[in-house]
């Protein structure tokens, strides 16, 4: 049974090892996450230049929307100020900056009925983040920019945390993924990436069974193992779902092979070389 825990323990080792065992921490906002959400919202308002950012898909034509969202993704992923805010958040939650590295923040944009767009299909593929060549010690940090109900977040399939999921993760090699630059890594910098790039996914037709969802307030903090099998929920609320996530690794855990169980990850490549030290 999936365990949701609310209070971040003072001992970071306790948090990490609980996550490696499948627990999920869903914590209240901290000073750093509130700052991060404010900065991200300011950036979105500035770049999209619309009346209401959660309805920007109604005000902008498809090409303009895609181009501006792409610029936002690059900004948030690459700018040092966002890296520094994330470092502060991690330290505020007990992560030792001398032992922690991260793959930077990604802006996630889930439009109403976006699952009907073939170009966005990979957004909704059920998967494990570890299938993208991350170590089994991967912990994912996730925070929404708005209050979200259970139907707007993502589904977790706890029955498969320690069970094999038929998948094609062997197709993913990190070094091949980034050989032409960081566009695929940042996500959706080319309009047809969802049609042309090969993304790890579970076998078509595989039934993962019962899922577990959750609601979360704006700037709430989720810490979850990258090995959890999960999927973005399609939504038709009429509003865009904006969220941010980053991938964290405790370097000593990665070096010692400590982490969540590896039951089916066959991806390859050296992604840790490009992680940023907190």
Image (cartoon, rainbow, N blue to C red):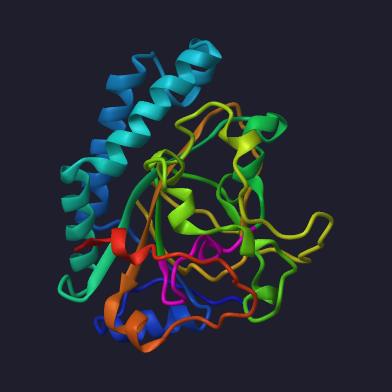
User: Which corner quadrant of the image does residue 13 belong to?
Assistant: bottom left
Q: Estimate the x, y position of residue 261 in percent, counting from the top left.
A: 55, 83
- Tell me what residue is drawn at x 29 percent, y 60 percent: 275
For the record, the magenta segment spans 127-139
User: Which corner quadrant of the image does residue 170 belong to?
Assistant: bottom right
Q: Residue 94, can we see it?
A: no
> Main SS type for the magenta part?
loop
- Tell me what residue is drawn at x 54 percent, y 77 percent: 3
136 part of magenta stretch: yes
Foreground: 185 or 143?
185
Q: In this view, does 49 lie above or below 121?
A: above
Q: Residue 2, can we see it?
A: yes
Q: Is residue 220 left or right of residue 230?
A: left
Residue sitting farthest toward the right: 205
Foreground: 202 or 218?
202
**Image quadrant occupied by the N terminus:** bottom right
Q: Estimate the x, y position of residue 127 in percent, counting from the top left.
A: 62, 59
Q: Estimate the x, y position of residue 140 in percent, counting from the top left.
A: 42, 63
Q: Is residue 92 above or below residue 264?
A: above
Q: Is residue 116 above or below residue 256?
A: above
Q: Is residue 207 left or right of residue 83?
A: right
**Image quadrant occupied by the C terminus:** bottom left
Q: Estimate the x, y position of residue 209 in percent, counting from the top left.
A: 78, 66
- Tell me what residue is drawn at x 69 percent, y 79 percent: 163
Q: Is residue 8 left or right of residue 214?
A: left
């Amino acid at each position: 049974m999936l365990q949701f825990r609310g209070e971040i323990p003072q001992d970071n080792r306790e948090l990490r090892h609980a996550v490696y065992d499948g627990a999920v921490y869903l914590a209240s906002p901290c000073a750093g996450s509130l700052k991060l959400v404010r900065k991200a919202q300011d950036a979105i308002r500035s770049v999209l230049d619309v009346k209401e950012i959660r309805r920007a898909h109604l005000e902008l034509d498809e090409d303009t929307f895609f181009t501006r969202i792409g610029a936002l993704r690059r900004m948030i992923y690459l700018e040092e100020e966002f890296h520094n805010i994330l470092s502060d958040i991690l330290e505020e939650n007990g992560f030792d900056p001398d032992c922690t590295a991260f793959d930077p923040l990604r802006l996630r944009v889930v439009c109403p009925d976006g699952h009907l767009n073939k170009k966005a299909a990979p957004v909704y593929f059920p998967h494990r983040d570890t299938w993208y060549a991350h170590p089994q010690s991967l912990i994912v940090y996730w925070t929404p920019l708005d209050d979200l109900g259970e139907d707007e977040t993502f589904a977790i399939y706890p029955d498969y945390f320690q069970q094999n999921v038929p998948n094609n993760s062997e197709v993913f090699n990190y070094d091949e993924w980034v050989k032409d630059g960081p566009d695929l890594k940042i996500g959706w910098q080319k309009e047809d990436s969802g049609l042309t790039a090969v993304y790890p996914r579970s076998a078509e037709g595989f039934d993962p069974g019962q899922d577990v969802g959750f609601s979360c307030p704006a700037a709430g903090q989720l810490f979850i193992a990258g090995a959890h099998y999960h999927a973005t929920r399609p939504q038709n609320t009429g509003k865009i779902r904006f969220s941010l996530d980053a991938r964290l690794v405790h370097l000593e855990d990665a070096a010692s092979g400590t982490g969540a169980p590896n039951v089916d990850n066959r991806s390859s490549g050296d992604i840790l070389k490009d992680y940023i030290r907190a």
